[in-house]
Image (cartoon, helix red, strand yellow):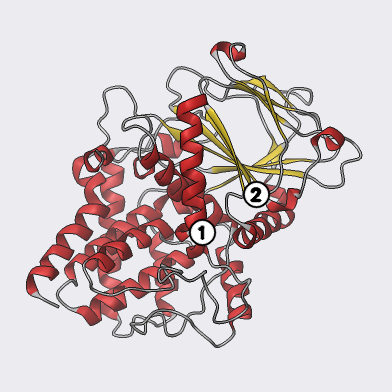
């Protein structure tokens, strides 16, 4: 690799993954207390620096100790590094971005040595599939490497050659990387952004397409079935003013690493001994994971938000790199009451600007007239000035609306409904007053 290209890679990769810490703009935004725990909302800049140093020093030590970076023991060491972090975070995945920054630095340092660069990138891909690093961080690093002509990994960037994802084994074995590379999701996000700008809301059908929608739905329904103990009754807002007649769902928050181990086991079973990876011969020992509930939550947080932000006027939304929140999984059982009319924005320091709701494919062709469960939007000031819209929770449907403007409710689910009504929700934030978002520097 040419000397000047190596230095360019070092500058680009390091700048992209560490700019938030270097500029002091990385924040954990103070949303409603019901979604961010006290330990997270109170984290300081000193804590952030301690975490970055812990992961940077720890990863450097792991790399120095091993000549073979495909050794499975490295995954256990990275998990131990996470578990030994000097700042305790209630959700382990909240520290994943710091390990991603450490990987970014190592990729930059190895830029002049292609074999080491490929090996470190390979380890980062494995870390992402183990729920230790955000998928989007490795996708971003890969994009920079590919643009500089260093190498391309068709595992991380499936379908980049015009194909339709993996075709080397079971055709329906969708991987989490495909969620992040989905052109269909990009188009859906643009349509959603256009509706937000024009009307304050949008409904997009077929957001993922049949194959990815089925994979995402399987992951979310596994989570609902196997992690039922994590669900609790939803509340109206942080005041706790709720009862069974106010809101009838049960909810669980998904941070980003949920189901990673199971996804790896399922992937190994589906792919067997065959390991698709890249033209560079990467990832020689590790069959790719299948989609996990944590991967779906990550896709909503970082990938969908990036697409929506890029399609909206500058300054409307804050880059998801600058905050950490969880996705909300909501379940309405047959006979459950609905959710009374409300807006998601709670005033004060609540930065939520856009609400995104995705209905998994398991909802099927939901008939709201028969089974209830419709989402009702009332756009306009105080929910009274716009056109009322009744939306059935049909599978693979994405709904977006302004959190602080659109009053909405959920109609109760009929006793005779044949299935539970599932929904995954996420909130995108507006920049707080007086705070500069560095992501705007790259936008026209």
Q: Which mark is residue 396?
A: 2
Q: Quadrant of residue 100?
A: bottom left
| Residue 209 at x, y percent in the picture | 60, 56
Residue at the (56%, 25%) spot, across then down: 344
| Residue 16 at x, y percent in the picture | 24, 53
Query: How busy is the neighbourhood of tag 2: few (under 14 within 10 Å), some, or many (20 plus)?
Result: many
The relative height of residue 188 versus residue 5 in the rendered view (above or below) is: above
Q: Quadrant of residue 249?
A: top right
Frontmost residue, 379 versus 342: 379
Residue extending furthest left? Answer: 4
Residue at the (51%, 32%) spot, across then down: 195
Frontmost residue, 312 versus 101: 312
The relative height of residue 4 versus residue 96 in the rendered view (above or below) is: below
Give the residue at mark 1.
Answer: 179
In the rendered image, the quadrant that contains the C terminus is: top left
In the rendered image, the quadrant that contains the N terminus is: bottom left
């Amino acid at each position: 690799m040419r000397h000047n290209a190596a230095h360019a890679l070092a500058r680009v990769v390091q700048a992209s993954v560490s700019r938030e810490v270097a500029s002091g703009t990385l924040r954990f935004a103070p949303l409603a207390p019901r979604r961010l725990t006290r330990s997270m909302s109170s984290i300081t800049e000193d804590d952030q620096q301690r975490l970055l140093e812990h992961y940077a020093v720890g990863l450097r030590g792991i790399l120095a100790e091993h000549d073979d970076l495909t050794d499975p023991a490295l995954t256990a060491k990275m998990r131990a590094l996470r578990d030994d972090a000097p700042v305790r975070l209630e959700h382990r995945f909240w520290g994943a971005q710091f390990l991603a920054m450490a990987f970014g630095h190592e990729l930059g340092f190895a830029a002049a040595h292609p074999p080491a660069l490929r090996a470190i990138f390979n380890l980062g891909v494995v870390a992402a599939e183990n729920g230790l690093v955000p998928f989007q961080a490795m996708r971003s690093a890969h994009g920079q490497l590919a643009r500089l002509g260093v190498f391309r990994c068709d595992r991380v960037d499936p379908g980049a050659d015009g194909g339709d994802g993996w075709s080397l084994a079971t055709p329906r074995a969708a991987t989490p990387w495909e969620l992040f590379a989905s052109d269909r999701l990009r188009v859906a996000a643009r349509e959603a952004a256009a509706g937000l700008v024009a009307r304050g809301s949008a409904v997009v059908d077929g957001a993922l397409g049949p194959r990815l929608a089925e994979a995402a739905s399987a992951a979310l329904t596994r989570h609902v079935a196997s992690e039922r103990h994590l669900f609790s009754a939803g509340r109206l807002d942080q005041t706790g003013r709720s009862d069974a007649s106010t809101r009838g769902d049960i909810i669980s928050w998904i941070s980003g690493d949920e189901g990673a181990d199971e996804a790896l086991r399922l992937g190994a079973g589906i792919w067997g001994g065959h390991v698709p990876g890249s033209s560079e011969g990467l990832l020689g020992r590790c069959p790719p994971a299948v989609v996990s509930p944590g991967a779906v939550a990550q896709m909503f947080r970082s990938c969908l938000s990036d697409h929506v932000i890029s399609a909206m006027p500058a300054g409307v939304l804050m880059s998801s790199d600058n905050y950490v929140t969880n996705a909300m999984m909501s379940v309405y059982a047959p006979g459950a009451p609905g959710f009374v009319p409300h807006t998601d924005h709670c005033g004060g320091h609540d930065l939520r600007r856009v609400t995104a709701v995705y209905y998994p494919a398991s909802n099927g062709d939901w008939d709201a007239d028969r089974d209830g469960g419709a989402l009702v939007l009332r756009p306009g000031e105080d929910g009274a000035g716009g056109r009322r819209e009744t939306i059935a929770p049909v599978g693979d449907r994405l709904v977006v609306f302004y959190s602080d403007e659109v009053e909405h409710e959920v109609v109760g689910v009929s006793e005779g409904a044949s299935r539970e009504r599932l929904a995954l929700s996420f909130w995108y934030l507006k920049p707080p007053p007086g705070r500069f978002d560095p992501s705007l520097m790259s936008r026209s």
